[in-house]
Amino acid sequence: AQKVTQAQTEISVVEKEDVTLDCVYETRDTTYYLFWYKQPPSGELVFLIRRNSFDEQNEISGRYSWNFQKSTSSFNFTITASQVVDSAVYFCALSVTYGNNRLAFGKGNQVVVIP
Amino acid sequence: DTEVTQTPKHLVMGMTNKKSLKCEQHMGHRAMYWYKQKAKKPPELMFVYSYEKLSINESVPSRFSPECPNSSLLNLHLHALQPEDSALYLCASSLRAGHTEAFFGQGTRLTVV
C-alpha cells in the first residue's frame, strides 16, 4: 500500500520568509510518481510538479524548489521569499505503476503567509 | 487550455432531490475522475473513467451515479443524499489514467439539507 505523510499541519510565516514543507512517502513499488498540488481558498487543486522515481534531480521553478531524496523517501517543497498569494493548502501525493489510477494524498500543509 | 470546468459552483439540495454535477474538459484527456473532499481533509477518490468506461468505483454508495457521455464530459448524478454527503466535489482529468498529472476543476460545494 502507498502512504504519504505530511507531518506539519499548519505553518505560519511572515512575508518574505522561506518555508519548507516536508513530504515522506512509503511504497514497495520501484516505479512511482510524486506530485505536489496547491489548493487556494477558491478550491481547485493546482498542479505544481510531477517527479518519477528514477529522476532524483532537484527542480527549481521561480520561487518554488523541490528536493527529492530516495534514500530518505522524501520529496520536500520549499517556497522562497513567501508572498501572501502563497497562502493555501499544499498536498503531496504518490501514485504507483501497477494496479490503479489512484493518487494517495498526504493530509496537506496549511500555509499562512502573514503580511 | 488546461482548464477543467465544473458546474454549478455551489449547490444546496434537500434529501429527496435529484441533481447533477457537470464537468467538462477540452484537453483531449482520456481519464476523468470524481473526488470528494471534506473540510480540512485531502481529496478522496470516488470514480475513475478511462476512455469513457468506468474503471474504478471506490465502493461509493449508489446514491451517487457517475456518467461519462463522451470523452469531454463527466456527470455525477445525485439522488437521496444524506447531510453527511455535504462536501466539495472535485472533478479532474489526465492524459491517461495512472501517473500522468491530473488537472482539477474548482469544485462544486454541495450542501445537503
Image (cartoon, rainbow, N blue to C red):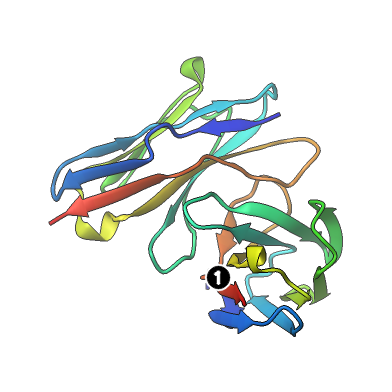
Q: Residue at x 68, y 69 (%)?
A: B28
Question: Which quarter of the image is occupied by the N terminus of chain A?
Answer: top right
Q: Residue at x 73, y 72 (%)?
A: B81
Task: Mark yes or no: residue A101 visible.
Answer: yes
How many numbered markers are drawn? 1
The residue at which mark 1 appears reads as B107
Tell me where residue B90 appears, x and y as whole percent.
Answer: 60, 65
Tell me where residue B9 appears, x and y as whole percent.
Answer: 53, 80
Q: Residue B12 is drawn in which quadrant?
A: bottom right
Q: Amino acid at mark 1?
A: Gly
Q: Of B90 and B17, which appears nearest the observer?
A: B17
Of all chains, the one bearing label 1 is: B
SS at mark 1 in the image: loop
Please, is residue B7 above or below residue A95 in the view? below
Tell me where residue B108 appears, x and y as whole percent.
Answer: 57, 74
Tell me where residue A91 appears, x and y as whole percent.
Answer: 47, 46
Question: Which quarter of the image is occupied by the C terminus of chain A?
Answer: bottom left
Q: Of all residues shown, which one is farthest toward the top? A: A71
Please, is residue A60 above or below residue B3 in the view? above
Q: Of B57 and A78, which appears nearest the observer?
A: B57
Q: Residue at x 82, y 52 (%)?
A: B59
